[in-house]
Image (tube, grey):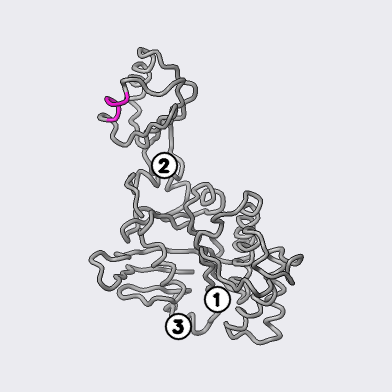
Amino acid sequence: MIRIDSLHYRYRATSQPALDGVSLDIGRGGILGLLGPNGAGKTTLISLLAGLLAPQEGGIAVDGEPLEAWRAAHPTAIALVPQDYAFYPMLTVAENLDFFAGAQGIPRRQRRDNCAAAIAFACLEAVAGQRVGELSGGLRRRLNLAIGLTGAPEVLLLDEPTVGIDPQSRHFLLNAVERFAAAGGTVLYTSHYMEEVEAVCADVAIIDHGKVLTAGPLVEVKRGGAPALNLEIARPLPDLAADWQARFPEMTAVGNTVDFPEFPADALAPLLAELAAAGVAVERMRYGAPNLEEVFMQLTHHALRD
């Protein structure tokens, strides 16, 4: 449905491009998880898809038509649900939905139907007449989603939609995303919660420094990562720690847990022998194909970026 082709974007007064030749395909009725460290280019890409920025080089097409022309013909078909709350706390849930539907130019009769459908989808009937400032964090997140649905969009751009909420609310929102896609909607889903992406996304793309590092079906992306080793030992590492760190620079040790994001199979037996010789028992070990977070760390490395 959406084809992103060699997209470039550079902000003024910056030496590095925010996007540097990004190409992606997002199929209709699918959920693509977009992952990357802070500053990787995720927000810029979302802003371009939402029409908040215009491409400088490359292009975006929807169903074979340039994005700008497609948006002109379908003005409410792409909806952005931002990470920040985007509503008026002094208005009620119903008033917020009506306001944002009206801001999209939706006729009053259709607006009423669309708002009712959004309230039902987000299960907000019990609080429709309540001021938003009085709502819990989970209800506010559900309202954020409902506002995005008032235009009956075909595409949802979700930017960290579950930040700061309880497990029950998170489960509800993830289920809502799956329901939207199952009904034929298309979702671009960004999150720092890797378990969420693994739970709902059939496809993922990892970007960093404005470039796509890997993209494709989740199972293939995980299969492409180097085998990882996780050890839980009886006590913190002895003097072996410094030697291991020199041999395996990507190793991390926190308390009794030791992680090797990339670990060669032929080094496993000697390493376990070293632990045994040092009198350190292994309580649990996992070795094999990495999970999504391990693939992410392998590709983007461990440097923290603010």
Q: Amino acid at mark 2?
A: Glu
- Disc 2 on helix, strand or loop? helix
Residue linked to disc 3:
69
- Say whether residue 275 is left or right of residue 172: left
Residue at left offset 36%, top offset 14%: 278
Residue 4 point in image, percent of width and height: 39, 68
Is residue 243 in the magenta section? yes
C-alpha gap between disc 2 and disc 1: 35 Å
Q: Quadrant of residue 176?
A: bottom right
Residue at left offset 34%, top offset 48%: 304
The quadrant of the rendering that contains the C terminus is bottom left
> In front: mark 2 or mark 3?
2
Which mark, by number, is residue 77? 1
Give the mark, 3 or 1, whose residue is nearer the N terminus: 3
Residue 256 point in image, percent of width and height: 44, 26
Mark 1: few/some/many CA within 10 Å (<14, 14-19, 20+): some
> Magenta span covers which residues?
241-245
Of residues 24 and 138, the one drawn nearer to the viewer in this rendering: 138
- Say whether residue 57 is left or right of residue 3: left
C-alpha gap between disc 2 and disc 3: 40 Å
Give the mark, 2 or 3, whose residue is nearer the N terminus: 3
> In front: mark 2 or mark 1?
2
Residue linked to disc 2:
294
Q: Amino acid at mark 3?
A: Ala
- Say whether residue 79 is left or right of residue 69: right
C-alpha gap between disc 3 and disc 1: 12 Å
Of residues 128 and 28, the one drawn nearer to the viewer in this rendering: 128
- Look at the numbered discs 2 and 3 and tell me whether their residues touch, using CB distance below 8 Å: no
Is residue 58 in the magenta section? no
- Disc 3 on helix, strand or loop? helix
Q: Amino acid at mark 1?
A: Ala
